[in-house]
Image (cartoon, grey):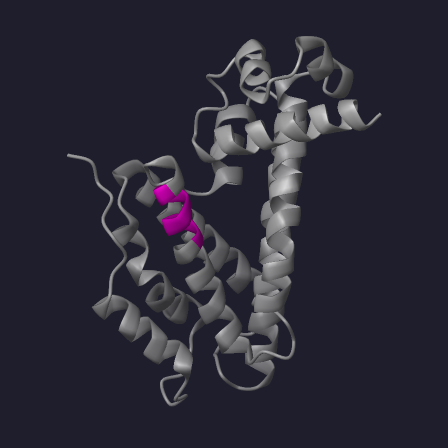
């Protein structure tokens, strides 16, 4: 039992790496098994298709990120600071992944979703579910900020979806350009989207200003 379970873990980890590296779709089942050092029969023991493995890998990636997201969006943290920390989390994670894989990776879920959703409805549903989980975190922060009079607006759900969509768009641009500097204005953009009131002397606005003065490393390959 331990050996077969370990094989499943190795397959899932290889899938996570390939998804971050934006090479999952082009990899064959044989190549995935070789990289994981498991027999092809083990693959089909746990997963019917590559899409099923991708779904499992996306869920594992989420579970790995969830504890930090829960800390970022804790109700004990001021609502605008939650948004600041989320922006910093995105920038830090992208920098770490770029250093590991040698290029800007963008959003792993969106990347695999864009490539497989037309072929597999289950992948589309999973990616939509994961994006919605992030949106719920944002919605809770925006709801509390509205309640405290820190931002304008009265539709936190719509604002959260707008912020999430904007972040996904910037991550896509950063991936296409292979340039982390695309993300340097993320915090300032979020400020504008959620409608932070000008009279609010928040660390959120100051943090965004500092981010503009200290942009992320440019990884564009000449």
Q: Residue at x 72, y 9 (%)?
A: 41
Specify the quadrant that holds the N terminus.
top right
Q: Position of residue 219 (x, y in %)?
A: 24, 44
Q: Is residue 125 left or right of residue 200?
A: right
| Residue at the outermost right position | 1
Q: Residue at x 64, y 63 (%)?
A: 70
Q: Measured along the vertical axis of the image, is residue 206 above or below residue 118?
A: below
Q: Measured along the vertical axis of the image, is residue 174 above or below residue 119?
A: below
Specify the quadrant that holds the C terminus.
top left
Q: Residue at x 47, y 35 (%)?
A: 20
| Residue at the outermost front position | 3
Q: Pick whichever, 133 or 103, lies toward us.
A: 103
Q: Is residue 211 left or right of residue 203?
A: left
Secondary structure mostly seen in the magenta stretch: helix
Asked if residue 88 can be seen in this view, the reply is yes
Q: Position of residue 101 (x, y in %)?
A: 38, 36
Residue 160: say if magenta.
no
Q: Is residue 201 left or right of residue 216?
A: right
Asked if residue 172 can be seen in this view, the reply is no
Q: Residue at x 29, y 49 (%)?
A: 180
Q: Measured along the vertical axis of the image, is residue 210 above or below residue 94?
A: below
Magenta stretch in the rendered image: 93-99
Q: Position of residue 115 (x, y in %)?
A: 49, 26
């Amino acid at each position: 039992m331990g050996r077969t379970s370990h094989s499943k873990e190795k397959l899932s980890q290889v899938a996570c790496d390939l998804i971050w590296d934006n090479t999952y779709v082009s990899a064959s089942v044989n190549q995935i098994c070789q990289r994981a050092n498991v027999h092809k029969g083990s693959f089909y023991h746990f997963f019917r298709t590559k899409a099923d493995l991708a779904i499992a890998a996306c869920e594992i990636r989420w579970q790995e990120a969830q504890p930090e997201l829960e800390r970022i969006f804790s109700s004990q943290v001021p609502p605008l600071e939650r948004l600041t920390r989320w922006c910093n989390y995105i920038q830090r994670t992208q920098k770490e992944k770029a250093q590991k894989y040698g290029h800007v990776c963008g959003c792993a879920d969106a990347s695999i979703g864009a490539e497989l959703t037309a072929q597999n409805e289950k992948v589309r549903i999973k990616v939509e579910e994961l994006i919605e989980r992030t949106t719920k975190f944002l919605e809770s922060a925006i709801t509390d900020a509205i309640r405290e009079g820190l931002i304008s607006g009265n539709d936190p759900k719509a604002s959260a979806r707008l912020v999430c969509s904007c972040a996904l768009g910037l991550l896509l641009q950063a991936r296409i350009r292979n340039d982390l500097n695309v993300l340097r204005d993320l915090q300032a953009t979020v400020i504008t989207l959620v409608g932070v009131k000008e009279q609010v002397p928040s660390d959120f606005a100051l943090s965004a200003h500092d981010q503009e003065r200290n942009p992320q490393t440019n990884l564009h390959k000449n």
